[in-house]
Image (tube, grey):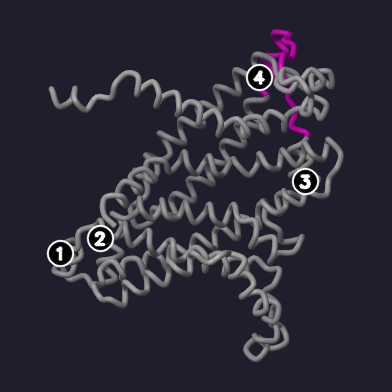
């Protein structure tokens, strides 16, 4: 009992730590929350000098766009349930109904189905329910709210094409990085030779290179790819420049050393006795890796996959240099949005596009929070 009291922090230190965390949280969340509020207001409210006008949106209400108490209650209830199920229900549902060998496919299908259900409930079911309550109780709007900017971005300006391009790039980068990274990380973690050490050092040096250096090195190859591939593919040889495949190749080159180092650290935290026991039971090296080691490694794989996803999803330099306008991903498309538009309406639409790209990030973190925490903890134990 005395040891517990000795390790307990003083009240002043606890208050200081809590105050610092609260300040940091507010500082980090403020810009995201503020642009989210601006994106659902009329331009006159979004850029108003008074913060109360930005929040309450009197000009938006005057245009006939607003939320009543019933709308706010339905949004809070629906949003709370969606967040609770993403954190508590979805991981358990996948764990109960999907075997360990098919867990990645199960997670992908579960996330797709969950997103569809949330969109249908949030944009069809709850609005109609709130509309019926508003009509029955004759409620007036108290907060300005409009989705016209999101409609303009996704439908009129075809921002969904940029979303599809981002999905292609991120899926390719994560799939290739994790496939190569798990095999290389496992092999290097079980190898005691000096060659494995120098391979890891070489990967670390390669990872330290500026991204612009790699793009400059690959650029001539991508531009002349049609001539280089013509002996193999004939006259239909494609030009890789301006294609998502070129971005995937460069981002995998940038990301692969990191995934190898991180996954090697996770594999080293798994006792080698598991491999030996599997070999004694008749498994080959690959069977031991797939049936025994990988089920234990899923938290580390998910954590590494999330970092790979963030690299590809948030990349600006590589995608803006290697993709043309028709194949642009979301991040450079938003930057071009801000650069080319001048009216306040166009600027609010650009803000709505910026808010849109944060939703998948929040969903992934909420859905995989347990695996991320356990994966980071496992990687910190030994490495």
Q: CA distance from mark 1 to mark 2?
A: 9 Å
Q: CA distance from mark 1 to mark 4?
A: 59 Å
Q: Nearer the viewer, mark 3 or mark 1?
A: 3
Q: Earlier in the sequence, mark 1 or mark 4?
A: 4
Residue 375 position within the rendered picture, expressed as x and y whole percent measured from the top left: 35, 49
Which residue in the protein does label 2 denote?
Answer: 292
| Residue range (magenta) | 128-148
Which residue in the protein does label 3 denote?
Answer: 338
Q: Earlier in the sequence, mark 1 or mark 2?
A: 1
Whether 56 is drawn above or below 233: the answer is above
On screen, residue 53 versus residue 247, left or right, reads right
Which residue in the protein does label 1 denote?
Answer: 277
Say whether marks 1 and 2 touch (CB < 8 Å).
yes
| Magenta-span inclusion, residue 136 | yes
Which residue in the protein does label 4 denote?
Answer: 71
Q: Earlier in the sequence, mark 3 or mark 1?
A: 1
Q: Earlier in the sequence, mark 3 or mark 4?
A: 4
On screen, residue 112 versus residue 278, left or right, reads right
């Amino acid at each position: 009992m005395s040891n517990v009291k000795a390790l307990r922090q003083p009240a002043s230190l606890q208050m200081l730590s809590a105050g610092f965390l609260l300040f940091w949280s507010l500082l980090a969340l403020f810009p995201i929350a503020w642009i989210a509020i601006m994106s659902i207001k009329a331009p006159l409210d979004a850029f108003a000098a008074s913060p109360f006008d930005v929040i309450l949106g009197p000009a938006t209400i005057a245009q006939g766009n607003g939320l009543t108490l019933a709308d706010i209650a339905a949004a809070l209830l629906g949003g709370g349930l969606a967040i609770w199920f993403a954190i508590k229900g979805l991981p358990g549902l996948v764990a109960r109904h999907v075997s360990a060998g098919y867990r990645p496919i199960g997670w992908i299908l579960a996330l797709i189905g969950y997103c569809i259900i949330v969109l249908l409930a949030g944009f069809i079911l709850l609005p109609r329910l709130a509309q019926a309550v508003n009509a029955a109780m004759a409620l007036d709007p108290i907060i300005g709210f409009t989705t016209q900017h999101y409609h303009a971005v996704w439908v009129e300006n075809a921002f969904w094409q940029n979303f599809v391009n981002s999905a292609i790039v991120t899926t390719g980068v994560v799939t290739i990085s994790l496939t190569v990274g798990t095999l290389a990380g496992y092999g290097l973690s079980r190898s005691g030779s000096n060659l494995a050490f120098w391979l890891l050092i070489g990967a670390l040096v390669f990872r330290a290179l500026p991204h612009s250096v790699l793009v400059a090195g690959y650029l001539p190859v991508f531009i002349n790819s049609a001539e280089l591939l013509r002996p193999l593919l004939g006259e239909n040889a494609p030009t890789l420049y301006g294609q998502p495949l070129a971005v995937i190749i460069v981002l995998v080159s940038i990301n692969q050393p990191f995934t190898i180092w991180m996954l090697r650290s996770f594999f080293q935290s798994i006792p080698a006795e598991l491999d030996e026991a599997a070999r004694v039971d008749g498994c080959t090296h690959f069977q031991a890796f797939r049936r025994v080691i990988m089920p234990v490694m899923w938290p580390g794989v998910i954590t590494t996959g999330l970092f790979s996803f963030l690299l590809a999803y948030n990349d600006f330099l590589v995608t803006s240099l290697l993709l043309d306008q028709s194949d642009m991903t979301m991040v450079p498309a938003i930057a071009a949005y801000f650069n080319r538009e001048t009216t306040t309406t166009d600027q609010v639409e650009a803000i709505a596009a910026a808010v849109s790209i944060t939703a998948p990030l929040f969903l992934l973190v909420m859905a995989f929070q347990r695996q991320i925490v356990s994966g980071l903890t496992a990687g910190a134990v030994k490495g």
